[in-house]
C-alpha cells in the first residue's frame, strides 16, 4: 500500500524535522516545485518560539524541494496509516539554493573536500532513552503499557543485558526490520549502559546519505516508540546525573581511485587524515558550537562520562573528542577499508547535515594549511598531569553554552563556513534558549530538552 500522504521535510537548526505534506498521488507531478516554506521558520527554537531578532522577520518565501534519495515510509500502526517522509533542500522560488539551507551547506562542504582529491564516508551511531509515555518527555500518545504495549520498567534491567534487550521487544525487532525495509542499513541494536538507554547503528556511506540517515533513523525511532506507548528521547541528558545520550560520527577518507586513506599499513594516520584531524581539533571550540549546541550539551562532557572530556586525539580512548577506532582483523576483508576516526563530541540537539559540514570544513582547513597530525593519546586522560596537557595536544572544551557560542564567534575561519545569516540565526536561537532557561535548574533544563529532542 502506498502511504496516502508524503511529508516533505527539512531538519532545522534545533535538529527537528519539520515540513508539509501533499497527497502521494500528486507527488510525481508536484515534486519538482516542492511545497512552500517560510525563512523565519529556521529561527524556531527547541521550545517553539521564534528567536528574535532574526535576519528574516515576516518576509520571504521558499520552497522545500524533496530529494527522492532520502525517502522512507513510516510504517502503519493501529489506526495510524503509513506516511511517506522525504527530506528536502530549501530553495528560492526559482529553485536556486537558499543561502541558509542546512542540507546545501553539507553539499557545499563535501565539495570543498573533493577539491582536495578526497571524499568522505561516514556513519552515525545514536543513543537514546526509552521511557514509558508520561516518563521522560511527558505524556505520549498511543497504546499504554499493560494494554498490549510494553512493560518497560525504569531501572529494571542491567546495562547491556539480554533482559534489557528483551524488555523492549518487539520494539527492537520492529525497528531493525523497518530500518532494513527502508534502506537505512541497520547494523547493531543494543541496550546501552544507562537506565533505559539504547543505541542503534547503521552502515557507513557517503556523507550526505549518512546525515540523511541520521535524521531518518531518529524519525523512525520516535515514531515507533510512540506507537508502543513509549517515548524515545535523544536529548544529551534526560537528567543531570543520567548517562549521556551521544551521537558518534565515524569518518573515513578515500582518494579519487576509491582507496581508503585514513590509516596507513602501520596503523598511523596518513598525512591527509592527520591534517584533517588536526583541523578538527584546531577548531574544536567552534566545531562544538555546532555539534553540541544546546544549553545542556556541555553537561554531557566531562571526565569519566565516556563522551568527550577534552579536545584531543585518542587511540581507542572513549574520552577523546576524536578517536582512532580499532580495526578488527578477526574476519577477512580489507582492514584499511574498515579504518575510521570517531568524532564523539556530538549530540542530537545538533543538525546532522551541519555536524558533518563543520567537521569537514574544519578538516579541510587542516588539509589546506598542511597541519601536522596531532599527538595520539594512547593511555588514560587522567594519567596526563594538567601541566603536560597542552604539550600532549589536549585542550579543554568550553564549559558552558555561553562560552561555546563565544568561541564560535571568536573563530574567524569558522565564522566563514556558513552564510552570515545562518550563523546569526544559530547564535540567536541558542541565546534565546539560554534566556528562556535562565532560572531553570539543571534538572528542569534536561527535562525541557528531553520533552522535545
Ligand atoms: N553515552 C556515551 C556518550 O554520551 C557514549 C558511550 C559509548 O562509548 O558508547 O557519548
Ligand atoms: Mg554507545
Image (cartoon, rainbow, N blue to C red):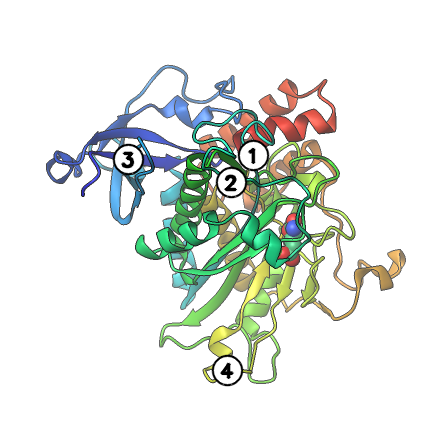
Label located before the other in sequence (1 or 4): 1
Give how far apart the Cα atoms at labels 2 and 1 are. 8 Å
Give how far apart the Cα atoms at labels 4 and 3 are. 41 Å
Q: Quadrant of residue 270?
A: bottom right
| Ligand 1 closer than 8 Å to label 1 CB | no
Category of crowding for the residue at label 1, using alpha-carbon neighbours closer than 10 angstroms: few (below 14), some (14–19), many (at least 20): many
Where does residue 172 sit, x and y in percent of width and height? 47, 51
Q: Is residue 384 toward the left or the right of residue 211 in the image?
A: right
Q: Is residue 261 visible?
A: no
Disc number lying in front (2 or 4): 2
Label located before the other in sequence (3 or 2): 3
Category of crowding for the residue at label 2, using alpha-carbon neighbours closer than 10 angstroms: few (below 14), some (14–19), many (at least 20): many
Q: Secondary structure at mark 3?
A: strand
Residue at 84% across, 59% down: 382
Q: What residue sits right under mark 2 in the picture?
A: 150
Q: What residue sits right under mark 4 in the picture?
A: 331
Label located before the other in sequence (2 or 1): 1
Residue at 35% across, 77% down: 257
Q: Are marks 2 and 1 in contact (CB under 8 Å)?
A: yes
Q: What residue sits right under mark 1 in the picture?
A: 132
Q: What residue sits right under mark 3 in the picture?
A: 8
Amino acid at each position: 500500500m502506498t502511504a496516502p500522504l508524503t511529508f516533505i521535510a527539512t531538519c532545522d537548526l534545533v535538529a527537528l524535522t519539520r515540513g508539509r505534506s501533499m497527497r502521494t498521488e500528486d507527488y510525481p507531478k508536484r515534486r519538482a516545485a516542492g511545497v512552500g516554506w517560510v525563512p523565519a521558520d529556521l529561527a524556531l527554537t527547541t521550545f517553539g518560539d521564534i528567536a528574535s531578532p532574526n535576519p528574516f522577520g515576516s518576509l520571504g518565501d521558499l520552497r522545500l524541494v524533496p530529494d527522492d534519495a532520502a525517502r522512507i515510509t513510516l510504517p502503519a500502526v493501529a489506526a495510524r496509516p503509513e506516511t511517506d517522509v522525504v527530506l528536502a533542500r530549501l530553495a528560492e522560488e526559482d529553485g536556486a539554493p537558499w543561502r541558509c539551507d542546512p542540507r546545501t551547506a553539507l553539499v557545499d562542504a563535501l565539495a570543498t573536500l573533493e577539491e582536495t582529491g578526497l571524499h568522505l564516508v561516514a556513519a552515525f551511531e545514536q543513543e537514546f532513552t526509552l521511557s514509558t509515555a508520561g516518563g521522560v518527555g511527558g505524556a505520549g500518545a498511543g497504546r499504554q503499557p499493560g494494554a498490549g504495549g510494553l512493560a518497560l520498567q525504569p531501572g529494571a534491567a542491567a546495562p547491556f543485558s539480554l533482559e534489557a534487550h528483551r524488555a523492549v521487544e518487539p520494539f527492537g525487532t520492529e525497528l531493525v526490520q523497518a530500518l532494513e525495509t527502508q534502506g537505512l542499513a541497520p547494523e547493531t541494536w543494543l541496550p546501552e549502559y544507562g537506565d533505559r538507554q539504547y543505541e542503534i547503528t547503521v552502515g557507513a556511506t557517503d556523507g550526505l546519505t549518512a546525515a540523511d540517515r541520521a535524521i531518518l533513523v531518529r524519525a523512525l525511532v520516535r515514531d515507533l516508540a510512540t506507537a508502543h506507548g513509549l517515548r524515545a528521547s535523544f536529548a544529551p541528558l534526560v537528567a543531570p546525573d543520567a548517562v549521556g545520550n551521544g551521537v558518534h560520527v565515524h569518518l573515513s577518507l578515500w582518494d579519487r581511485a576509491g582507496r581508503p586513506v585514513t590509516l596507513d599499513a602501520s596503523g598511523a594516520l596518513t598525512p591527509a587524515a592527520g591534517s584533517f584531524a588536526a583541523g578538527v581539533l584546531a577548531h574544536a571550540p567552534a566545531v562544538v558550537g555546532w555539534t553540541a549546541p544546546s544549553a545542556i550539551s556541555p553537561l554531557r562532557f566531562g571526565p569519566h562520562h565516556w563522551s568527550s572530556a577534552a579536545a584531543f586525539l585518542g587511540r581507542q580512548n572513549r574520552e577523546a573528542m576524536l578517536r582512532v577506532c580499532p580495526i578488527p582483523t578477526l574476519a577477512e576483508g580489507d582492514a584499511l577499508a574498515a579504518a575510521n576516526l570517531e568524532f564523539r563530541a556530538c549530540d542530537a540537539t545538533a543538525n546532522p547535515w551541519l555536524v558533518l559540514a563543520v567537521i569537514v570544513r574544519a578538516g579541510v582547513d587542516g588539509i589546506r594549511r598542511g597541519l601536522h597530525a596531532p599527538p595520539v593519546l594512547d593511555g588514560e586522560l587522567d594519567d596526563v598531569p594538567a601541566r603536560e596537557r597542552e604539550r600532549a595536544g589536549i585542550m579543554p572544551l568550553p564549559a558552558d553554552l555561553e562560552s561555546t557560542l563565544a568561541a564560535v564567534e571568536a573563530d574567524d575561519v569558522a565564522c566563514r563556513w556558513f552564510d552570515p545569516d545562518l550563523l546569526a540565526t544559530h547564535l540567536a536561537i541558542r541565546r534565546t534558549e539560554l534566556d528562556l532557561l535562565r532560572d531553570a535548574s539543571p534538572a528542569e533544563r534536561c527535562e525541557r530538552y528531553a520533552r522535545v529532542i
